[in-house]
Image (spheres, coloured by chain):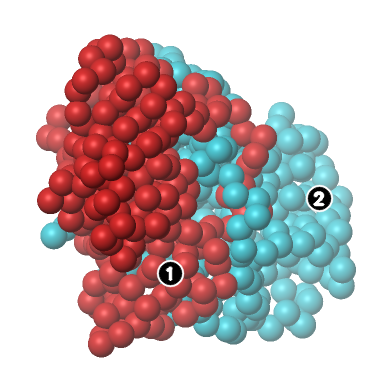
Chain colours: A red, B cyan
Amino acid sequence: MNYSLAPIGVVHSVFRERFGIPRQPLLVPEAKARLELLAPYSCIEAVAGLEAFSHLWLTFIFHKTMRDQWQPQVRPPRLGGNRRVGVFASRSPFRPNPIGLSVVVLDGISHQQGKLELLLSGIDLLDGTPVLDIKPYIPYADSIPEARSGYAAEPPQVSKEVRFSETAEAQLRQRDDGVELRGLIVKLLECDPRPAYKNRSQSDRIYGMRLYDFDLKWRVVGDEVEVVELAI
Amino acid sequence: MNYSLAPIGVVHSVFRERFGIPRQPLLVPEAKARLELLAPYSCIEAVAGLEAFSHLWLTFIFHKTMRDQWQPQVRPPRLGGNRRVGVFASRSPFRPNPIGLSVVVLDGISHQQGKLELLLSGIDLLDGTPVLDIKPYIPYADSIPEARSGYAAEPPQVSKEVRFSETAEAQLRQRDDGVELRGLIVKLLECDPRPAYKNRSQSDRIYGMRLYDFDLKWRVVGDEVEVVELAI
């Protein structure tokens, strides 16, 4: 039997493509999003009491990575991209049911001109992500610090120093959100989001990552990541 | 746009009806279940590496409480059953999308005669529950002990002493699983699972709860719960 589920909301996020998105939520507190509730769920009654919770669970659809076929194994980036594990032993977006699960910080609730939005941070969600459910995070049930956690026991490590080219610095200075954006870019790049399985020796390669309304251009030089420019 | 999702597994659980099920998973470690993976997902490759994780997230369907209509507010038992909160500020099974989320303990993996089952404990799942997804629990991402948690800050409190009638004691002695079952019954009843909104003064009322293949009959007498019998 199949279950037909309709989104109750949609995410408006700074992340406009999959590449570079933090691999787990909360790693980058500067990463913000709005979750717009869709009618008929966009009524303030349905979120009454939610402001008493600091964190939420979002159940969502990996809408950009849906596939007709499934594979029993995946190669998690945490294993260097060349070891396989069972798809159910991973959080890969390539799953039999393309369901994602993220804990996010609830910063506030905005209700203006008939639009109801949850203001979120610490997100790892692509712009346009359809959300199926919102639940409060309940520490006594959900927080298990002693859980044993195979190959993902430690968070991804900061491995690079991030510096900005003169062009990038000038572009940041021209933006109202420049200071905040600088902080977000450092957090995104200091963990080195290059695909693990690609040849990393090619140090002159410039990577691009869609963020807000621009392409973030950067390259790796030794232990440093240089932000080249914010290309429009 | 609707998403059509098919179960990847089904739960075989000691809980045969909703009444009496622990209100959050992990509260009753004695509560066990098997999660049978359904074809084509019942292949050992798909769970390879899972044994390195002590806890799992299950995303499932509240199959016994699906409704055609949704209500924006619910009355959580934790608030005494007479205060309303928004459905998204609750974990009520009556939700726009009937999606449940539980963390469970993975005790082992059984692969026999072509049947692949995950052996689970600490569950709050009804027998027959369709499971949409399995993900590993990752403490660095999922464990947030400092999260602020509105009306559900503390786990449900033990409020009753549980004792067994002579009939019930004799019935337990006759079962191979008697000792374990006794432990499970104590854990289930010591938190007083009576509906909060019903009149609790009626102390002679006998409650029934479907567990395994019997009806667990019990009543409340002052600060005690008396297990009357295990009725077949």
Residue A197, quarter of the rendered image: top left
- Residue A89 seen anywhere in this rendered image of the structure: no
Question: Circle 2 sits on which residue?
Answer: B167
Q: Position of residue A144 (x, y in %)?
A: 63, 42
User: Do the numbered discs 2 and 1 sit on residues whose CB atoms are within 8 Å?
Assistant: no
Camera-nearest residue between A51 and B59? A51
B15 w.r.t. A71: above or below: below
The answer to whether residue B76 is above or below residue B97 is: below
What subunit carries mark 1? B
The location of residue B71, given as percent across then percent down, is: 37, 78
Q: Report if residue A176 is visible in the image.
A: yes
Kind of residue sitting beneath label 1: Phe
Q: Residue A181, percent across and down?
A: 35, 54
Residue type (three-letter) at the residue carrying disc 2: Thr
Q: Residues within 10 Å of mark 1 (few under 14, many from 20)?
A: many
Pinpoint residue A157: horizontal percent, then vertical percent: 50, 29
- Chain letter, disc 2 residue: B
Please report the residue visible at 18 percent of the width from the left and 51 percent of the height from the top: A214
- Which residue is more in the foreground, B103 or A126? A126
Q: Residue at x 26, y 18 (%)?
A: A203
Q: Quadrant of residue A192?
A: top left
Q: Which mark is residue B88?
A: 1
Give the left or right position of residue B73, taking residue A67 as reference: right
| B34 displayed left or right of B36 | right
SS for callout 1: helix
Residue found 30% across the figure and 85% down from its top = A112
Mark positioned earlier in the residue sequence (2 or 1): 1
B49 on left or right of B52 = left
Identified at 41% across, 83% down, the residue is A45
